[in-house]
Amino acid sequence: MEIGEEVNAAKNTITSDGVWEVVGTADKIVVTSGKKILEYNPVSDDKDEILAKISGRTGNLRAPALRIGNTYYIGFNEALYQQIREM
């Protein structure tokens, strides 16, 4: 897999105002929550629920956040990253 763009989240945070602008048009949002892997459709699923899962305590987009195609993967989970590597 080739990296098209890499952004350092410590230097370029996506604040609460911009989080939905980034992910709101995605086909799918995959979020890790502990050992759980949750999938959301931003068109049909509850916006506030999605924002609560993908935002940290400060309201910024959680890291790591990957975009592959038009799918966002947010948070770290070893099993999920293994699946991504095998794509």
Image: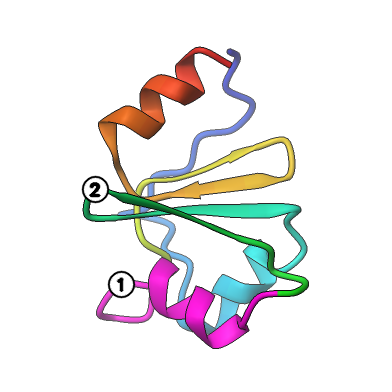
User: Can you say whether 1 is above or below 77 in the image?
Assistant: above
The spot of residue 26 in percent (x, y) is 73, 56
Q: Quadrant of the N terminus?
A: top right
- For label 2, the residue is 35
Q: Quadrant of residue 59?
A: bottom left
Q: Amino acid at mark 2?
A: Lys
Display coloring: rainbow
Figure quadrant of residue 18: bottom right
In-front residue for pair 80/16: 80
Residue 12, how many percent across, how many down?
43, 57
Q: Position of residue 53 (x, y in %)?
A: 40, 71
Q: Earlier in the sequence, mark 1 or mark 2?
A: 2
Q: Secondary structure at mark 1?
A: loop
Q: In x, y percent, where is residue 27?
A: 75, 53
Q: Residues within 10 Å of mark 2 (few under 14, many from 20)?
A: few
Above-or-below relation of 28 to 43:
above
Magenta span of residues:
45-60
Secondary structure of residue under mark 2: loop
Question: Is residue 54 a member of the stretch shown in magenta?
Answer: yes
Look at 38% across and 21% down and name the residue there: 82
Question: Tag 1: residue type?
Answer: Gly
Q: Which residue is mark 1?
A: 56
Query: Residue at 46% across / 23% down in the picture?
Result: 83
Residue 34 as seen in the image, left or right of residue 28 = left
Give left or right: position of 46 versus 24.
Answer: left
Does 28 sit left or right of 86 as displayed? right
Instruction: Locate the C terminus and report the quarter of the image it occupies.
Output: top right
Q: CA distance from mark 1 to mark 2?
A: 17 Å
At 41% from the left and 79% from the top, the residue drawn is 52
Asked if residue 74 is positioned above or below residue 55 in the image, the reply reads above
Is 8 within the magenta? no
Which is more foreground, mark 1 or mark 2? 2
